């Protein structure tokens, strides 16, 4: 579990910031680009660390990827892609379409986070 703790902290911080920004979206507050940037950096760094852990841990030990590790990496990558799609759709389409893409980003990101936690705590 020790090699996975930095990833747990990164993804937890990204999830917490995403939940806070989602709450701000529901309150119809304006979004802060700095918060979006930090959420992006934390999410991409966490996803990258998950992908790196599929190969080997920082201490040289091999982390058993199994189906949960590979699924977590795939779902988190999908969450990153839908997060980028949210900004594109929000600028070009209606607020309702942007909200639906944002909802899909939130659901896919939460699913990836849960799958990662299952993998981390079964390690």
Image: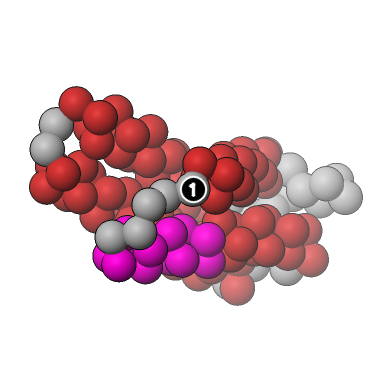
Q: Indicate yes or no whether the magenta region holds residue 118.
A: no
Q: Is residue 34 left or right of residue 82?
A: right
Quadrant for the C terminus, please.
bottom right
Picture residue at 43% right of the left edge, 39% below the top = 80
Residue 79 image point, x, y percent: 38, 45
In depth, the one of 113 and 43 nearer the eye is: 43
Picture residue at 38% right of the left edge, 63% below the top = 24
Does residue 39 show up?
no
Picture residue at 65% right of the left edge, 56% below the top = 10
Seen as rendered, the residue at the extreme right is 59
Which span of residues is magenta-colored? Answer: 16-27
Residue 122 image point, x, y percent: 58, 72
Picture residue at 51% right of the left edge, 41% below the top = 33
Q: Is residue 61 left or right of residue 9?
A: right
Q: Quadrant of residue 11?
A: bottom right
Disc 1 secondary structure class: loop
Does residue 65 show up?
yes
Q: Would you call the spot at circle 1 few (<14 residues within 10 Å), some (14-19), or many (20 or more)? A: few
In depth, the one of 19 and 47 nearer the eye is: 19
Residue 35 image point, x, y percent: 54, 50
In the displayed structure, 22 sits above or below 41; it is: below
Dominant SS in magenta: helix
Q: Which residue is mark 1?
A: 32
Quadrant for the N terminus, please.
bottom right
Number of callouts: 1
In depth, the one of 13 and 51 nearer the eye is: 13
Q: Indicate yes or no whether the magenta region holds residue 21.
A: yes
In the displayed structure, 99 sits above or below 33; it is: below
In depth, the one of 115 and 27 nearer the eye is: 27
């Amino acid at each position: 579990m020790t090699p996975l703790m930095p990833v747990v902290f990164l993804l937890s911080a990204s999830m917490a910031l995403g939940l806070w920004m989602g709450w701000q979206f529901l309150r119809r507050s304006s979004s802060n680009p700095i918060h979006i940037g930090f959420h992006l950096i934390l999410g991409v760094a966490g996803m990258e660390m998950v992908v790196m852990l599929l190969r080997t841990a920082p201490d040289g030990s091999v982390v058993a990827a199994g189906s949960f590790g590979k699924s977590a990496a795939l779902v988190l990558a999908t969450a990153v892609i839908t997060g980028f799609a949210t900004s594109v759709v929000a600028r070009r389409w209606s607020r309702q379409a942007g909200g639906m893409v944002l909802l899909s980003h939130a659901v896919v990101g939460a699913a990836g986070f849960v799958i990662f936690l299952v993998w981390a705590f079964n390690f």
